[in-house]
Every structure is written in structure tokens, then in C-alpha cells.
Image (cartoon, rainbow, N blue to C red):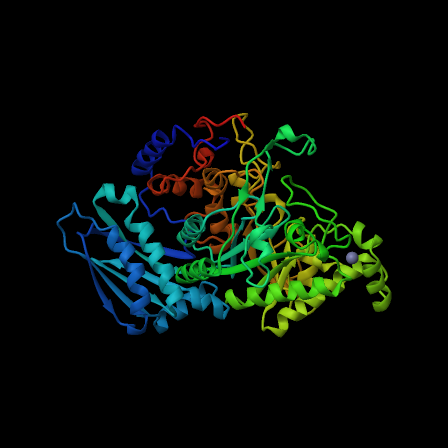
């Protein structure tokens, strides 16, 4: 009904982009750009169909076969030439010296590093671990599918030395405001892997929906996962029922679905970090279990957006017991060592008036309700620690002190991130500007409705996750950054595609490639990135993605819905 209609001109746009690509790009249009590469001044003919693989590292064969199958599927069936030879090997001493000279400093970088040589009919892929090999295959796929290269009939011989700049190359997805079926999550993960992103932050719970099956609490899937109405526009008057779509919306992931998605992500080198929001953004859970709130009154799952006063009661021991049981289940089904505990936007109105919360504050001698939140988060963080897991939370969790080992996701600008890094906590940067991919990307009147803000493709591309004024000793705590995709105004998957693509590809390059001002040789300017992006239009079109075209030519605006 209100479904976002994809750009009608996208097919035309794609062909314009591909044509442009044929005539203007003579080099491989990689995104993200490798740390270093060198063309060898020779070419080799485009190979024929099929692959001949020589495994010098037998241990990796099982994993590598599925990755290489994707390359096989790109086979040049129209070409009668000999098949591409692929040699899979470990890094040699000379590779190690080269990679160190290019700036590898940490173990995790070695883990993801690779060397790729394409020459004389053979692609040699060398890595320290299967992860590095996986990234080598991603790079090779982008080379073999390149429309510009295929059109010339020959492949430039090249050497690539590559490794990521940041350990946390994250993408978040809000499945609470709008629920997405597992096949959509799988698609999202596949886009991430193509662009070498490696952390999927799964925002599973919020006021408007609880999306994770917890066997001990069936109310979460019977009640909390569903809402009867959804606000259509901005929340100007949430009481006006005419502004709502009166249609049930919801859904949840079963344990089997979660396990399958986590396995799929793992096969693509992606960690899955689940988020269970607390103590705020809890209205959906409280709809099924009202006794866990301060007033214990029954309210439904809200169909509008905002910050709600009803939150988990910090004084009621049953509430803490509920949350620890939920976390125990989360720890069982998510293998990653990190769990996101939310911690943002928790009004203290109910706690101030609640006898149990007040009693808790007196018994712990806490000065105010902010200290109560700090105590609440610490208790949950300690519980995770007892399960061998560590916590990350939005930057509000810094207020009132943070236990050792907990990490901070800085969303209210970068101040929280800087303070956390200076205090020796790991930090993931995701400031609203420019990491919120639910903000507008263009100011044309035909843009579909977004929550507000303006994060253009160029803003995302030129983002630097390490703040200029951060002391050198604190820089090591910046783990990376993340694009956040809140879905209040994304009522269809087409619109998610439109908001994420191509801005995710810009962030991918920020997080993988050398910093803007440290690029060796050609590239790593916005203009060069935009030229390479044009060459990815063919892939996006083949995927049926409703991508935003502003990236390569702002004058080519397709028709938009008038929501
Ligand atoms: Zn309370």
C-alpha cells in the first residue's frame, strides 16, 4: 500500500553507468580499494569457463570451495580460452615483509590479510588464514565481473597486498520498528561480505517489537512481537488514529532461524552481535510482562516512535532475573563474545516515583537515578562476564562510570567515544553524522520520507573514525565504525536497499582502506571512489537492488514516491 516504488529509471541508469565504465575505467574498480596494488604492465586474455584449483594449503580446501564456486559462476562461457588457474597458498616471507612495510601491526590484521597476484593465466591467492583467503576471493570476484575489463577482452596483470585498517567494520539493522524475514537478513549479510564488512549488529528488541524467541518467556513471541497499528508519517499527533495504518505488523526469529543466520554470517567472515535493549526501549517486552515495569500497568505494543517513560524497573528483582535469563539464552545461541545491551534514551520519570527503585537507591546509597542506571548496567555487564561474554552499549552507559572491559558505541557525536577511549574502553564510532544511514542522502523534493538529517554519500565517504584531537595513546581503543539503519520510516525492503546502497560501500572503504590522507598511489579520493562505484551499478542491477543513484550523478534522479 505504502510500499516504496523503486526507481523506474534504474535500468536506463544502470546501462549509462556501465557504458561510462567501459569507456572511462581501465583499472579494476575495487571497493574497498586495497591497501596497496601495482599493475605489472602486461595483460592476460580473459579465461574461458571453469577453474583449475591447486591447493597448496589443503586445510582450507573445504571452506575455499564454496567461495571459489562463486568465481566459477562468473565463468566466461562465451570465451573458448583455457580455464582460469587458481593457486591457494599461505603467505611467504617476502609477503610478510611487504605487508609489514605497508603498515600491518596487529594479529587480527594478519588474520584478514592476503596477497593476490593475477598474471599469466593464474590467480595466486596467499593468506595467513581462511579469513584472508576469503577476502582475496572477494577481490578477485570484483576483478572478473568488471564490465569494463570484460569488454576489453583482456585482464591487466596486477599484484595486490591488502589488509583492513579497522577491526570493527559494522552494519546495524533495526528489525524491531519493521520486521524483516530471514531471507532479507541473508541478503543484507551478502552485501556486507561483498564489501568486506565484518560485524552485523542485530537490533532485536525495541518499544515497537521484540523479535527473538526466548523459550522461557512465550509472551515475548505471542504478544511483544506484534503491534496492531503503525504510524504512517512523522509523529506530529500520535493521538490521531487517522495517521495510523491499522494493520497487524510483526514477527520474530526462532532459535533455528537465528542459528542458521549466524552460521551463514560466519561463512562470510561476519560476526553477529545481538542487541537486547535495556533498561529503556522496553515497551514491547512490558506489553507481555507488565509486572516488570515500575507501575505494573498493562499497555500495548506502541505503533508510534519516540522515547517512552515506561522502562524496566530497576528495583524489582524479578525484572533483573527476567533479563539475566534472556541474556543466558542469547549467550547460548549467539557464539560471538560481545552482546549489545542498549542503554540509551532511558527516562528516569518512573524510577523517581517507584517505591522499589527508590528503595534500591537507598540500600545502595546511590545519589540519583542516573547512578541507578549505572548500577543496573553494571549488574548486567557482570552477568555477561560470568558467561564469558563482554558488553557493548550506546554512549549513555558511560554516565556514572563503566566497568572494565565494557565497550562503547558512540552515537551522540564523538565525545562519548573520545571519553571512553581516554578511559581505556574499546570504542565503535557511529555518530549520527554521517553514520546514520536512515538520514536523507539528498535534498531533492522527490526523496522518500526519512527520519531527518542529511548524510550525503560524500559525507560518509570522507568520514574519519579517529577524531583529530584524540591523543595517540587513546587511538588504539578506536575499533572501527558502523553504519546504523533504523527502520521507523523503512516500510519496505526496497527502501532499506535504497537507504543502504550505495552509502554502505562508502563506509566499507573508510573502514578497510588506508585513511584518506595516507593513500599510496592512485585513488582514495571521493571522485575516484565515485568512478569505481559506477562500475558496481551492473552488479546492483543484477541483484535487483533499488539503489540510490545520487552517488555517481546527482542530475539523474529517478522518480520517487511522494510519501
Ligand atoms: Zn521501579
Residue 274, position in %: x, y? Answer: 55, 59
Q: Residue at x 50, y 51 (%)?
A: 510
Residue 219, given in percent of the width and then of the height, sits at 60, 55
The total number of labels drawn is 0
Q: Is 562 placed above or below 57 here? A: above
Q: Where is residue 479 in the image (x, y as percent from the top left)?
A: 57, 61
Q: Quadrant of the C terminus?
A: top right
**Horizontal arrangement in the rendering, residue 436 relative to residue 165 (left or right):** right
> Where ligand 1 lies, by quadrant?
bottom right
138, 46: nearer the viewer? 138
Please identify the quarter of the rendering in which residue 528 is found: top left
Picture quadrant where residue 60 is located = bottom left
Say if 377 sits above or below 184 in the image.
below
Q: Which residue lies furthest to the left in this view?
A: 80
Q: Is residue 551 left or right of residue 415?
A: left
Give 485 or 476, whichever is nearer the viewer: 485
In the figure, is residue 398 to the left or right of 234? Answer: right
The image shows residue 136 at horizontal and vertical percentages of 35, 60
Along the line of sight, the residue nearer the viewer: 246 or 529: 246
Query: Could you tell me if residue 58 is visible in this image?
Result: yes
Q: Can residue 514 be seen in this snapshot?
A: no
Image-based side of 421 in relation to 442, left or right: right
Residue at image x 20%, y 44%?
A: 153
Indicate whether 414 appears above or below 477.
above
Amino acid at each position: 500500500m505504502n510500499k516504496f516504488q523503486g526507481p523506474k529509471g534504474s535500468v536506463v541508469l544502470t546501462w549509462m553507468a556501465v557504458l561510462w565504465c567501459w569507456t572511462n575505467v581501465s583499472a579494476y574498480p575495487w571497493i574497498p580499494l586495497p591497501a596497496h596494488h601495482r599493475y605489472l604492465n602486461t595483460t592476460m586474455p580473459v579465461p574461458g569457463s571453469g577453474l583449475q584449483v591447486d591447493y597448496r594449503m589443503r586445510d582450507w580446501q573445504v571452506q575455499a570451495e564454496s567461495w571459489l564456486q562463486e568465481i566459477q559462476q562468473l565463468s566466461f562461457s562465451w570465451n573458448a580460452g583455457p580455464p582460469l588457474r587458481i593457486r591457494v597458498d599461505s603467505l611467504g616471507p617476502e609477503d610478510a615483509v611487504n605487508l609489514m612495510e605497508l603498515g600491518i601491526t596487529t594479529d587480527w590484521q594478519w588474520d584478514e590479510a592476503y596477497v593476490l597476484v593475477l598474471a599469466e593465466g593464474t590467480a595466486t591467492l596467499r593468506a595467513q588464514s581462511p579469513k584472508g583467503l576469503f577476502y582475496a576471493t572477494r577481490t578477485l570476484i570484483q576483478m572478473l565481473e568488471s564490465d569494463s575489463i570484460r569488454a576489453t577482452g583482456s585482464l591487466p596483470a596486477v599484484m595486490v597486498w591488502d589488509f583492513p585498517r579497522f577491526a570493527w567494520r559494522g552494519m546495524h539493522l533495526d528489525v524491531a520498528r519493521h520486521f524483516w524475514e530471514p531471507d532479507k537478513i541473508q541478503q543484507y549479510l551478502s552485501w556486507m561480505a561483498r564489501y568486506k564488512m565484518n560485524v552485523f549488529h542485530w537490533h532485536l528488541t525495541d518499544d515497537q517489537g521484540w523479535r527473538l524467541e526466548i523459550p522461557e518467556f512465550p509472551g515475548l513471541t505471542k504478544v511483544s512481537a506484534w503491534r496492531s497499528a503503525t504510524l504512517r508519517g512523522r509523529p506530529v499527533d500520535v493521538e490521531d488514529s487517522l495517521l495510523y495504518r491499522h494493520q497487524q505488523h510483526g514477527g520474530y526469529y526462532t532459535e533455528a532461524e537465528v542459528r542458521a543466520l549466524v552460521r551463514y554470517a560466519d561463512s562470510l567472515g561476519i560476526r553477529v552481535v545481538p542487541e537486547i535493549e535495556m533498561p529503556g526501549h522496553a515497551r514491547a517486552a512490558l506489553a507481555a510482562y507488565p509486572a516488570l515495569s515500575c507501575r505494573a500497568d498493562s499497555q500495548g505494543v506502541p505503533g508510534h516512535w519516540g522515547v517512552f517513560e515506561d522502562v524496566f524497573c530497576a528495583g524489582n528483582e524479578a525484572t533483573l532475573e527476567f533479563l539475566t535469563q534472556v541474556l543466558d539464552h542469547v549467550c547460548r545461541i549467539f557464539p560471538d563474545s560481545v552482546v549489545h545491551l542498549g542503554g540509551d534514551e532511558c527516562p528516569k520519570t518512573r524510577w523517581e516515583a517507584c517505591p522499589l527503585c527508590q528503595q534500591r537507591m537507598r540500600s545502595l546509597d546511590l545519589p540519583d537515578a542516573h547512578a541507578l542506571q549505572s548500577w543496573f548496567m553494571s549488574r548486567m555487564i557482570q552477568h555477561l562476564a560470568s558467561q564469558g561474554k563482554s558488553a557493548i552499549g550506546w554512549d549513555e552507559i558511560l554516565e556514572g562510570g563503566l566497568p572494565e572491559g565494557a565497550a562503547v558505541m558512540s552515537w551522540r557525536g564523538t565525545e562519548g567515544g573520545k571519553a571512553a577511549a581516554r578511559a581505556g574502553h574499546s570504542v565503535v564510532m557511529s555518530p549520527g553524522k554521517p553514520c546514520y544511514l536512515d538520514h536523507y542522502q539528498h535534498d531533492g523534493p522527490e526523496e522518500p520520507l526519512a527520519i531527518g538529517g542529511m548524510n550525503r554519500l560524500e559525507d560518509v565517504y570522507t568520514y574519519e573514525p579517529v577524531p583529530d584531537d584524540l591523543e595517540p595513546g587513546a587511538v588504539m581503543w578506536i575499533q572501527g565504525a558502523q553504519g546504523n539503519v533504523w527502520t521507523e520510516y523503512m516500510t519496505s525492503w526496497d527502501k532499506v536497499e535504497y537507504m543502504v546502497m550505495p552509502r554502505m560501500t562508502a563506509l566499507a572503504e573508510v573502514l578497510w582502506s588506508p585513511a584518506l590522507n595516507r593513500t599510496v598511489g592512485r585513488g582514495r579520493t571521493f571522485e575516484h571512489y565515485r568512478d569505481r562505484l559506477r562500475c558496481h551499478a551492473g552488479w546492483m542491477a543484477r541483484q535487483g537492488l533499488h539503489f540510490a543513484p545520487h552517488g555517481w550523478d546527482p542530475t539523474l534522479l529517478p522518480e520517487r514516491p511522494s510519501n
